[in-house]
Amino acid sequence: MFKHILLPTDGSEKAQIAAEKAVELAKQHGAKMTAVVVIDPFPYIGLGEASAFGLQAYLAEAQAMAGQSLDLARQIADAAGVPFTADTIERSAVFEGILDTATSEGCDLIVMGSHGRSGVKALILGSETQKVLTHSTIPVLVIKS
């Protein structure tokens, strides 16, 4: 049924649980999997060398964290024998990066974790998962844990 599953990840425990479910589904359906980390752009507000250094430090740290997140997902996929690719992209709106990746990669399912916030907390804090659910044109499986 599914041929290409997208796994947005941030390396959190919730994302790792979603990765395990995504790999399980991919294996059952003979699908391939793509994991993506969406990095927020550096908030450039200053001038001079300090800002250039801040940008470099920020991007280095963000890339390192993305690499760790994607490595965790890769290990889970490799252990199950699921074809896996990974990407790190930069977008100011994380949900748009997720949806852009789903479109560009030709994914037919997005599997992502949720922190499970509800009520006022969910309204105030917002949720990338909720934004993906609202704007996605392909099915989204939310793994609550």
Image (spheres, grey):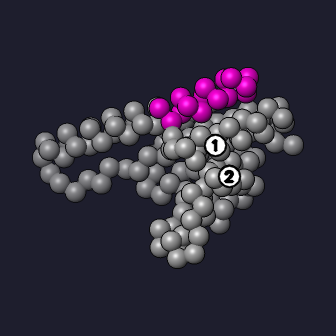
Q: Is residue 44 above or below residue 15?
A: below
Q: Secondary structure at mark 1?
A: helix
Tell me residue 14's x, y (percent). Answer: 58, 47
Q: Which residues are magenta?
A: 68-82
**Nearer to me, 52 or 27:** 27
Tell me residue 22's x, y (percent). Answer: 71, 40
Label 2 belongs to which residue?
A: 143
Q: Is residue 134 left or right of residue 29?
A: left
Residue at the far right: name it. Answer: 1
Tell me the quarter of the image containing the N terminus.
top right
Label 2 amino acid? Answer: Ile
Query: Is 73 part of what is drawn in magenta?
Result: yes
Tell me residue 138's x, y (percent). Answer: 74, 55
**What's the residue at 51%, 36% (across, down)?**
69
Label 1 amino acid? Answer: Ile
Q: Secondary structure at mark 2?
A: strand
Image mark for residue 17? 1
